[in-house]
Image (cartoon, grey):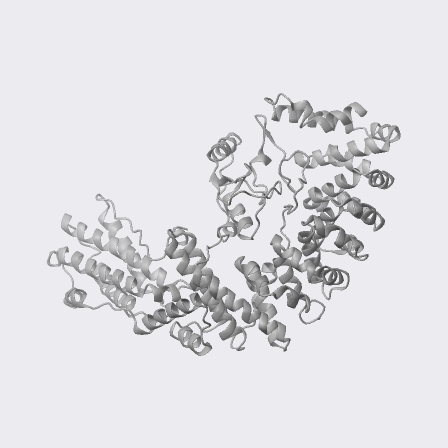
């Protein structure tokens, strides 16, 4: 793990302790030397190969020293060699890292300097080592003497091809800043010198640069890296994707990485979805620990225990990596409340961090380590001038190809756009400025381009300012048509997720609801879709019924039987929070309450309330039951009173809330009010 977190070309070697056992030191030297000697360099690097050759000679020497006694001077020299070989091992690891070819070329002089320093350190350590105190073979002694002589006079210089390529890349970035598009032939020559031969290798280079800059400091690194990423994106599109020299973009998009609706119920709307203002969760433990609930130490976005809690401008706390992903997607609102953020700065919440440690120790659990998947979540890279101009040039090029409508270039342009708007939030702003949205919508009904067009619109709709452009370009009707008659189930789910984001704009909710087929198609997706499709449909319907005029349309479309069917399925517990949020909203209106009562919702809600579930789920149930009692009258209260477990469940919830908020003077006027009102009604 240390290698994964280490910055490129930093060599954090550790010197052996002074009283180390000589046999252990020599054994470690032999293992380390063998690791270095078996290192495979994917590209020809003369400097690194020279150091590997020197290490091969040292390995011969170490093998000869196995049965000797070492003086203090010899131990000092061997310790210095161990320290130097550690640094060399780190250096070779960097030379072998996939996707590092461009960055190595730009740092070729630094790499040569490091190699020169390591060679000099080896020669100094060999000077100190008293070779004549040991009985070693004449051949090995001769090889070591030759190594010592060569280490003093060897010249380490950058490879000419890499220097030329680095100079040409800097020239391209300078052209980007002036708005000049590079020649495709020049791009081919640069990539050839860098030995980047496919679109996949370009993608590896981009991934490496994003990881590298995430650990960097200062604006120079970020400006340069953002420019290099723009250069690689431009080269990938022109040299490989449009020339047909490599795997197409569509083949590079795996099913696990395709655009999908966020698995957590995060509202882009201005309204709160949770009854108490606390985070919702689809599943989780309901555990009381000294008056505390372990679920409250989970991040509202990832639903995992927060390993690095930070606070945003609204005062709410999230895990650092989760909120950075939310912000990098172009969102400017609080995920929990929907309130617009006054700034994007985040601040460590040490109180929550320490409290989480104490609570986990109290119950005998270890503090969780950051998961592998979370480590891949990187903060957005601020774009420098070259990057902004380069992305603008690429956007205009892609839109030109898309508008021309010539197959297969039209298809390739859509594939690239889909990839870019998914992986790089900057393109969600840059591409719409080039009028890409009308061009994408024009391809939404074509069978060969429908999936890429719909996935691109989904990513673009995540940015609030793009939603109005989609609506003004006639996109809502096209999206509704895909939802009803999409060529693939996945494409229909993309359409539902896009409607979810569009419904985040209040003014678009009535427009979406006016299309007769939209709400029935979403209800049908609840019955027929995958778990992700059901989640997308439920979330989109929640956004739409926040507009009162869509209530009756949803009820007429059969939303209530579909929702109650999901609530009755134990295996769909991850959908409970979303489904209950819709039920609460429907129950607020008399016609919604009547339909819910007629469909037998009270029995299902009472059963969920009596089962073990997160507090937010129980609060949804209480809020729904309260609306049913208020709108349904005495008959509903009498029917609810006949449920044997309802009173015990309500009193249990009230007691927990009282324990959880012991210092709140207005407890019975705030958190517990719905539960108290239901108890009073019963």
The residue that appears at 61% across and 66% down in the rendered structure is 436
Report x, y in % for residue 393: 50, 68
Report x, y in % for residue 580: 73, 41
| Nearer-the-camera pick, 104 or 122 | 104
Say which quarter of the image contains residue 333.
top right
| Nearer-the-camera pick, 494 or 295 | 494
Q: Is residue 682 visible?
A: no
| Nearer-the-camera pick, 211 or 121 | 211
Q: Residue furthest left?
A: 132
| Nearer-the-camera pick, 622 or 439 | 439
Left or right, 666 with respect to 591, comes to left
Left or right, 141 with respect to 517, comes to left
Report x, y in % for residue 72: 15, 48
Q: Is residue 681 visible?
A: yes
Left or right, 441 with respect to 100, comes to right
The residue that appears at 58% across and 35% down in the rendered structure is 296
Say which quarter of the image contains residue 529.
bottom right
Report x, y in % for residue 586: 78, 41
């Amino acid at each position: 793990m240390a290698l994964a977190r280490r910055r490129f070309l930093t060599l954090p070697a550790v010197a052996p302790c002074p009283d180390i056992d000589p046999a252990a030191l020599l054994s470690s030297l032999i293992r380390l030397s063998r690791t270095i000697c078996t290192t495979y360099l994917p590209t020809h690097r003369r400097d690194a190969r020279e150091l590997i050759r020197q290490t091969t000679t040292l390995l011969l020497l170490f093998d000869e020293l196995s049965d000797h006694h070492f003086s203090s001077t010899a131990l000092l020299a061997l310790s210095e060699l161990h320290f130097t070989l550690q640094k060399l091992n780190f250096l070779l690891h960097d030379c072998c890292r996939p996707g590092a070819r461009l960055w190595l070329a730009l740092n070729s002089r630094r790499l040569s300097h490091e190699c020169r320093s390591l060679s000099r350190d080896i020669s100094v350590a060999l000077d100190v080592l008293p070779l004549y105190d040991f009985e070693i073979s004449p051949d090995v002694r001769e090889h070591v003497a030759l190594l010592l002589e060569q280490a003093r006079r060897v010249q380490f210089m950058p490879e000419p091809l890499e220097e030329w390529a680095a100079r040409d890349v800097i020239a391209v970035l300078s052209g980007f800043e002036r708005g000049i598009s590079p020649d495709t032939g020049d791009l081919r020559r640069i990539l050839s010198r860098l030995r980047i031969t496919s679109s996949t290798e370009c993608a590896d280079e981009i991934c490496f640069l994003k990881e590298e800059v995430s650990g960097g400091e200062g604006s120079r690194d970020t400006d340069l890296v953002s420019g290099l990423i723009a250069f690689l994106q431009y080269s990938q599109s022109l040299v490989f994707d449009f020339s047909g020299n490599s795997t197409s973009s569509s083949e590079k998009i795996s099913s696990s990485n395709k655009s999908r609706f966020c698995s957590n119920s995060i509202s882009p709307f201005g309204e709160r979805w949770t009854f108490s203002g606390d985070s919702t969760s689809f599943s989780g433990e309901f555990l009381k620990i000294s008056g505390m609930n372990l679920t409250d130490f989970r991040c509202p976005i990832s639903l995992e225990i927060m390993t690095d809690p930070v606070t945003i401008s609204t005062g709410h706390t999230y895990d650092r990596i989760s909120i950075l992903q939310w912000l990098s997607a172009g969102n400017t609102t609080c995920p929990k409340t929907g309130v617009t953020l006054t700034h994007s700065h985040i601040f460590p919440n040490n109180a929550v961090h320490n409290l989480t440690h104490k609570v986990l120790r109290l119950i005998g659990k270890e503090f969780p380590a950051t998961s592998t998947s979370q480590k891949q979540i990187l903060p957005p890279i601020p774009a420098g001038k070259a990057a902004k101009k380069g992305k603008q040039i690429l956007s205009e090029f892609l839109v030109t190809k898309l508008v021309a409508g010539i197959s297969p270039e039209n298809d390739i342009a859509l594939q690239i756009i889909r990839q870019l708007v998914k992986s790089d939030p900057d393109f969600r702003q840059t591409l719409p400025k080039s009028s890409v949205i009308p061009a994408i919508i024009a391809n939404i009904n074509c069978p060969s381009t429908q999936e890429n067009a719909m996935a691109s619109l989904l990513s673009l709709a995540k940015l609030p300012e793009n939603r109005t452009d989609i609506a003004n370009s006639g996109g809502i009707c096209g999206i509704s048509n895909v939802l009803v008659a999409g060529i693939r189930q996945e494409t229909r789910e993309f359409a539902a997720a896009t409607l979810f984001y569009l419904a985040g704009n209040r003014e678009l909710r009535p427009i979406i609801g006016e299309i007769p087929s939209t709400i029935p198609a979403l209800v049908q997706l609840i019955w027929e879709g995958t778990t992700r499709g059901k989640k997308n449909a439920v979330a989109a319907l929640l956004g739409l019924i926040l507009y009162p005029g869509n209530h009756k349309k949803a009820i007429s479309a059969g939303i209530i039987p579909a929702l109650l069917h999901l609530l009755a399925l134990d295996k769909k517990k991850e959908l409970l929070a979303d489904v209950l949020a819709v039920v609460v909203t429907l129950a607020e209106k008399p016609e919604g309450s009547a339909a819910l009562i007629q469909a037998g919702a009270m029995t299902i809600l009472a059963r969920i309330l009596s089962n073990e579930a997160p507090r937010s789920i129980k609060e949804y149930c209480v809020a729904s039951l309260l609306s049913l009692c208020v709108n349904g009258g005495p008959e509903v209260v009498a029917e609810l009173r006949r449920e044997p477990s309802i009173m015990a469940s309500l009193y249990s919830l009230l007691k927990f809330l009282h324990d959880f908020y012991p210092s709140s003077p207005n407890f019975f006027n705030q958190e517990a009010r719905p539960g108290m009102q239901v108890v009073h009604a019963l």
